[in-house]
Image: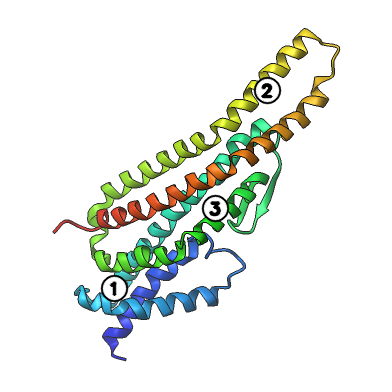
Amino acid sequence: MTPTYLILLFLAFARIFAMLQITPLISIQGIPYSARAGLALLTATIVVPTLYSNGYVLPQSFFDFIYLLFLEITIGLIIGFYLVIIFMLFELMAQMFSMQMGFAAAEMFDPLTNSESPLLGQFLNLAAFFIFMQTFGLHKLFLIGVEGSFLHLNATTLLFSAEPLAQTMIKTLSTTFGQALLMALPIIGILFMLSITMGLMAKAAPQMNLLMVGFPIQIMLGLFILMMTVPALFHFFSNILEQTWISLGQLILQMRAPK
């Protein structure tokens, strides 16, 4: 192995490993660092010829190497964070209708995301991961997020496109919030109407102890509506994932400096 090959291999490894550190499903605690590092190293050996063909500018000094290493890690984190935003969709949706169902305080530690999440959020996160695997998400991740990024984006072009990158991230965040609200709206709307009905009944008949009856009804009705809408939610999220790969490719192109 030549020194040039080793430098390119290490820079490629840095970008891929940084991406895998925060990418959903791969960044869970059940997967050890050594496995992620081995996968990143194996993938880096595959993409090194792409760096050769793209005329990757080699560092001329130690400080140039540190600078390129920092940029490679930044690119990997940006790609991984973009996927994290998409997977926040189901958890955000669960937080929206958990309050109406009475599960607002029912939070548990989620080992998949390494954070506290609503009880129903864990169920929806698992469903999202199953959809991700069913639609060949890992294959598309390495084809678009890894191979596509090295094919179209060099580390030295990142800082020239900071403004379009920020606009894309803000647009993705706003779109994710809107889609989560749209997916949770049927459950929120029906449970809100139930709350109004229970309030009117309590006002009309104060002697009725509707508080003890209202919470079980809300939970049962919310779970029933969720059960009825799960197929539609899965289909909706599958379409979102397909759009994610298209927008991820566009994001990589926007991160590239104009020629």
The one of 131 and 39 positioned closer to us in this rendering: 131
Q: Position of residue 151 (x, y in %)?
A: 26, 68
Q: Secondary structure at mark 1?
A: helix
Residue 38 in view here? yes
Q: Earlier in the sequence, mark 1 or mark 2?
A: 1
Q: Secondary structure at mark 2?
A: helix
Q: Position of residue 202 (x, y in %)?
A: 77, 14
Q: Which residue is mark 2?
A: 194
Whole-number angstrom distance, CA of label 3 to CA of label 1: 42 Å
Residue drawn at 23 percent across, 58 percent down: 256
Q: Position of residue 57 (x, y in %)?
A: 21, 74
Whether residue 251 is situated above or below residue 196 in the rendered picture = below
Residue drawn at 20 percent across, 73 percent down: 54
Q: Earlier in the sequence, mark 3 or mark 1?
A: 1
Q: Which residue is mark 1?
A: 63
Mark 2 Cα shell of 10 Å, populated few (<14), some (14-19), many (≥20): some
Mark 1 Cα shell of 10 Å, populated few (<14), some (14-19), many (≥20): few
Q: Which residue is mark 3?
A: 128
Nearer the camera: disc 1 or disc 2? 2
Whole-number angstrom distance, CA of label 3 to CA of label 2: 29 Å
Q: Quadrant of the C terminus?
A: bottom left
Whole-number angstrom distance, CA of label 1 to CA of label 2: 64 Å
Residues at circles 3 and 2 in contact by the CB criterion of under 8 Å? no
Residue drawn at 62 percent across, 26 percent down: 190
Q: Is residue 118 left or right of residue 130?
A: right
Q: Amino acid at mark 3?
A: Ala
